[in-house]
Image (cartoon, grey):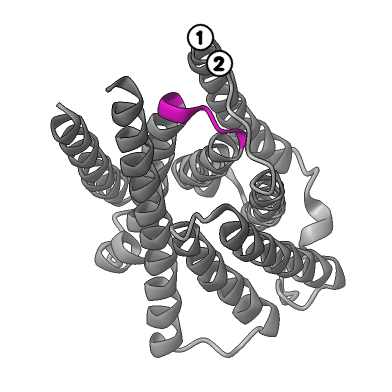
Amino acid sequence: MLSDRFGVDLFVAILIIAVATVALSIFQWLIWSSSQIENNMFYFWLPVGIELAVAYALARGYLAHGQGHIITFGIAALYSGLLGVVGIWIDYAATSIGPLVAVTSMSDLLFSALNFFAAFQFRSPGSSSSSSRRPRLAIAYVASAVACVLVCYLALKGLGSIFYGPPGVGLHNLPNEAVSLLAIVLLFASSILLLTKGSSYAGASFVSWYAAGLVLTALLYLLTLLNLPYSTASNFLQGLMSVAAGACALIFAFVYLRKTSLNTASDRL
């Protein structure tokens, strides 16, 4: 029974990745007839699909055990995944690249802050009652989706204009964006330290998978902060790092799901 349920969850996660990656790639091609559909499928839509699968697996893990930091990790993953979906609409609706830069900057700050909060919660994990888990999960994930849409709407209305300048200005040389990128890197670094310390204290070595994903994510933002010259090799490397970071988070989610499922099964014996 346990192995069957775990196998179903694994199948659903793979299905989410495949459907999201292919569907978003086709949707982008229908809108822009992009000749770079293969590159975008790897660099953008595959990581989006992985994040949505992570959100699903963490939701299943939270329902099984009810730990607060797991649902916060899930909120962050869902937000990141939905942002990729809504990002197509932003790119299509915006008259300039400014709103897209604003959405990315504001969302990256929120994503790094959510991960920091989850890592902080990990120091003293508690479990909610089984009867309250489904309502809490529903509220949390709906709030994540609403926040994603709201951030994108406000960016289109010009609220995030502090993150970009007029046409012709280097987008990654503005002081405000540099400060936000530095804050993001510091938040991720703090999250990594908290998770590393917490995993050794709680005996949860599988958390190192999520920490490894955050290391790769922090390096991606650090590369953006350094504003290195564009090249095909660097673009491929960053895309690979993004996929690897998502894969680490997915491994963490399923190892956690497996562990909690085994604990729940043993408690029933």
Judge from the rendering whether residue 136 lies leftward or rightward of residue 190; answer left or right: left
- Residue at image position (57%, 90%) is 229
**Quadrant of the image occupied by residue 40:** bottom left
- Residue at image position (61%, 53%) is 100
**Magenta-highlighted stretch: main secondary structure?**
helix
Secondary structure category for the residue under label 2: loop
66 lies above or below 160: above
Quick one: 126 or 57, which is closer to the camera? Answer: 126
Judge from the rendering whether residue 115 lies leftward or rightward of residue 56; answer left or right: right
Q: Which residue is mark 1?
A: 131
**Quadrant of the image occupied by residue 35:** bottom left
- Residue at image position (31%, 69%) is 39
Give percent across and percent down for residue 55: 43, 39
Quick one: 81 or 141, which is closer to the camera? Answer: 141
Q: Is residue 227 magenta?
A: no
**Label 2 is placed on what type of residue?**
Ser
Judge from the rendering whether residue 261 lies leftward or rightward of residue 211; answer left or right: left
Q: Which mark is residue 113?
A: none
Label 2 and label 1: CA atoms lie apart by 5 Å
Give percent across and percent down for residue 109: 72, 54
Q: Which mark is residue 129?
A: 2
Span colored in magenta: 63-68
Quick one: 184 or 224, which is closer to the camera? Answer: 184
Quick one: 168 or 255, which is closer to the camera? Answer: 255
Label pair 2/1, CB-CB below 8 angstroms: yes
**Label 1 is placed on what type of residue?**
Ser
